[in-house]
Image (cartoon, coloured by chain):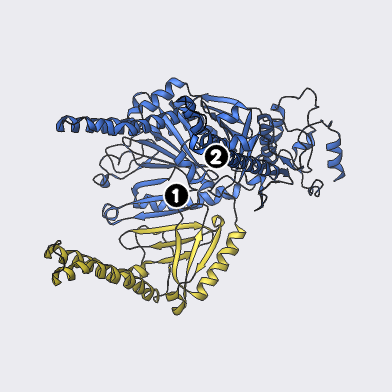
Amino acid sequence: MSLENDATESLPAKPEQTVDGDWNRVHPASPFVRGWVALAAVGFFFGRDAFERMLQGRDFMDPNLSGRVPWLLAGGAVVLLLTVGGFILSWYFTRYQVAEGYVRVNTGFLFKQQRQARLDRVQAIDIVQPLLARIFGLAELKFEVADAGESAVRLAYLPLDQAKQLRATILARAAGVVRGPETMEEVPEAPEHVVLSVPPSRLIGSLLLSEQTIGILLGAAVVVTTSVLFDNNAIFLALIPGILGIAASYWSSFNKGYNFTAAISPDGIRLRYGLLDTQAQTLPPGRIQALMVAQPPIWRIFGWYRIHVNVAGYGLAASTEGARTMLLPVGLKPDVLRMMSLVLPDPGVEDPERVFTAGLDGLGPAGTDSAMSDGFTTTPRRARLLAPLGWRRNGFLATKTALLIRSGRWWHTLVMVPHQRTQSMALHQGPWARRFGVADLVLHTTAGPVSPRVFQAGVEQAVQLFDQQAARAREARKRQTSEQWLAQVAPQAPEVAATQPAQPDQPTQPESDMQPRTSPQQEDRHDG
Amino acid sequence: MHTEAIDPSGVQWLRVSPKYVTVRLVEWAIGNVLMLVVLSLPLIFVLLGWWRWPPLWLAITVPAVTLVLALWRLVLIPRQVRSIGYAERDDDLLIRRGIFFQRTMVVPYGRMQYVDVAVGPVERSLGLCTLKLHTASAGTNAHLPGLPSAEGARLREQLSARGEARLAGL
């Protein structure tokens, strides 16, 4: 205890910074930024009529209503006051604290809610800036834990610098870099190294050549044909809402995917994207449960791929949104390989590039029964009637650290599941599969866009894989002992410290801060 | 209990209670009798001359086909119940089910988040219970119906204890 106090006191105390362990409030403007729609609605409701009258050159007020004008105004004022008052109260009663390995948020004044989440259970941290918040320099911090529902902790809104600072603090605590006492020192943001970015031209191209576009073109062809056949032009008018909807969906994809940048830092993978609303995601190492590389047929001309991931905190709601579970909206093969190497630093094979390439584009041999040419075990030849297109493509390969599953002759997909992330597994076999002597192996991971399934593997290989995979997952789980990702790879921690930029006004952190400490944490000093 | 091709070798399957057939029969009766009654209404109305529309052949075919399918499912129930099996291994629990569409599932103890024991009215009268395992994945649809209550309780305690011993993060 005393040793830790010495360590903390040796650091120069910095004035006017958010003292860790204190209860803090979000930025006072945040309810207005969040609730501007409500304010605008009130204004619109009461202002529209008067505005229209002024445009038409009539009286400001409806003469029939003139006797009631004061009442109307008073009503409007009361509604406005109530809304603003509610905003202020909700702001006043929302407080948060990061201390003792927990982040706590208290909200509500009539129905109080106190919520705390363990820092080392963090699955992902996002900093989101909707357009209006961005104008005011504010940001929302989302703290995700594995409950597959909504964000565990949402702090809306903080000044951007403070949000970043808080993110760095949380991640450092969760990683086990900063341990022990509730130190006051500012945790420097982990240095990051930009890995790749997606140029806007490629993003536009990928949107124009997506599956959505094919569907729209097909739909348009049908519409044109019918209108020509039936000589009816009214059908085009009926399409206008549809066209608006399509334009909106393209716009939202573009808005979300614009300026996509991926970076790596000791805190994990950082993703930034967005044109008007920007978002910065941080995925700590080992939090990605499954990964899928997909390539629609037209994208093959340009060699583009996209990557989706399952992250426990994002859950199912995010997969419909699409953007948050997207690890790469569009990229070339080198980009894909780089991202995969970030997700799985140790691929567990000799030549990962060849193996991943085989997984992305490879095709099994047409000849001999279940020969292993590129390492992937494909559907046996006897089942080629069951999967006439895919039988040479469907395949799996288990490396030392992950299971790779490829499928799809036209829609190329490659799914990767790290062994220690497998939750449970099931072998499925229907009557037809039994007739051809094949079986499907389904791996269960957390909710998300990726659902790993080995299609139509030969029964003997499938059962073998089932057994081996259970054993491999068990072994991998035994190796992974700590939730604190830097603490479990102890030799790397000083390296991280070395890469951190030296703060000019602050001496480099004492070496002892980087070493795991086992002493109990300081008792509630700041509670109250 | 004989093993199927997709079952891992060398596993001694434990079967669920044969009394579970009764539970399934009751479920079958409730579902299918209601459905048959509803689907037979047009036939009755047509025969009584109240309705014109569904031609007689259609009014006969629909309930007849439903009846045949229901009877088919009824015949399968005992075999389906016999096909449900489970085996406790050192590190995981195996569950299998199905005759046409077979499924063999492995749930590692360390992955279990919680274990449920549920008892319905029919099961309670027969002294049975249903055990449900939950992992972090929604895809793990692992439930073991028709366990004798004592066995269910034993399994629940056993699984919880083993899960705690081998607990892993996500």
- In-image side of A49 versus A363 (left or right): right
**Residue A353 coordinates in the image, percent (x, y):** 46, 30
Residue A368 appears in the rendering? yes
* Residue that label 2 marks: A67
Amino acid type of the residue that numbered disc 1 sits on in the rendered structure: Leu
Q: Which residue is drawn at 47% across and 24% down?
A: A57
Q: Which chain is yellow?
A: B
Element class at badge 2: helix
Tell me the subunit letter for badge 2: A
Q: Nearer the viewer, residue A495 or A240?
A: A240
**In this rendering, is residue B29 above or below A480?**
below
Q: Residue tagged by mark 1?
A: A443
- The residue sitting at 77% across, 32% down in the picture is A17
Distance from the alpha carbon under mark 1 to that under mark 2: 71 Å
- Looking at the rendered structure, the kind of residue marked 2 is Gly
Rendered position, A112 above or below A233: below
Write down the colour of chain A. blue
Taking A470 as reference, is B145 above or below it? below
**SS for tag 1?**
strand
